[in-house]
Image (spheres, rainbow, N blue to C red):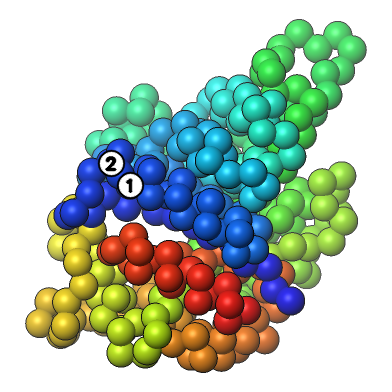
Amino acid sequence: MVGLSILDLVRVTEATDARQALDNARDLAAHAERWGYRRFWVAEHHNMAGIASAATSVVVGHIAAGTQQIRVGAGGIMLPNHAPIVIAEQFGTLARLFPGRIDLGLGRAPGTDQMTVRALRRTLTNSDNFPQDVLELQAYFAPVQPGQRLQAVPAAGTEVPLWILGSSTYGAQLAAEFGLPYAFASHFAPEQLLLALQFYRERFKPSEQLAQPHAMVGVNIIAAPTDGEARRLATTQQMSFTNIFRGARGLSRPPIDDIETYWTPVEKVQASRMLARSIVGSAETVRAGIAALVAETGADELMVVSDVFDHQARLRSFELIAAAV
């Protein structure tokens, strides 16, 4: 049976503030734990009023403190924005507080705009150092070696598992070379999904962390009692993607009855391309969609995004998804 995990966007909506978004994420994680989800990840996004997970390690700690068993982590930390030793200190601390429960997914993109990159005191050329930064970070989590003068305290010896995230073949090849698990972001960039998975599996080299390839596929799934209700709930995400093209990223909006009144034909094509892998419908529709996706990709695990405006409806969506699998 394919594993199910959650990527939560920690959405700030037109009906909530950032504190409520953070508490809703924690509440969802507690429910997800009971429903059998493996992991609960949040991602680093900056300068976005509608996403409250910019201080990603802090949010991970908030969620982990409200759960007992589910793995909690970053999906991901945008490593070019940070010195590896700082990320090691943060996630090493989390690993000490919540032993055996912390994951660290690493992305190469800055996760924001160029103006914000400058505000982070980083440059776009930092992404060129991504492979070296991953290895440096991995070394900080390893046991201290004799004569080692530089340590990330208290990270040494925690061996926090690293994941490589990606939306192209670059991340797939890096994950394969380093022998790390790989998560593909087909929930917003599905076009190279199959090619990236092929590259990853064909070129994988076993490592101390991982003996054989482990591929996670990101997917938007919105479930409701009926197909029609699920499609209506999905308009919230469709509007969010449309707003990206308008340069108007804001708070999450409540669903509408007819998405055709919101987007232009060109925006519809653009958003639909990014959302092409979405599974939207009743439990039966979701079950069939998941089975088809797993059969096509051979995914070991699905990282589910269910971007629903109302918190109770979102809980219901994730519960139906778990029951479908």
Q: Amino acid at mark 1?
A: Ala
Q: Going 33% across and 47% down the picture, which residue do you hit? A: 21
User: Percent position (x, y) of residue 119?
Assistant: 29, 28
Q: Is residue 116 above or below residue 300?
A: above
Relative to the observer, which residue lies in front, 242 or 65? 65
SS at mark 1 in the image: helix
Q: Residue furthest left?
A: 261
Q: Quadrant of the C terminus?
A: bottom right
Q: Is residue 193 above or below residue 9?
A: below
User: Percent position (x, y) of residue 129?
Assistant: 57, 36
Q: Is residue 274 left or right of residue 76?
A: left
Mark seen at residue 165:
none
User: Percent position (x, y) of residue 206?
Assistant: 86, 54
| Residue density around tag 2, few if under 14, some if 14–19, many if 20 or more, within 10 Å | some
Q: Is residue 60 above or below residue 122?
A: below
Marks 2/1: CA–CA distance = 5 Å
Q: Are marks 2 and 1 in contact (CB under 8 Å)?
A: yes
Residue marked by disc 1? 21
Q: Is residue 144 left or right of residue 167?
A: right
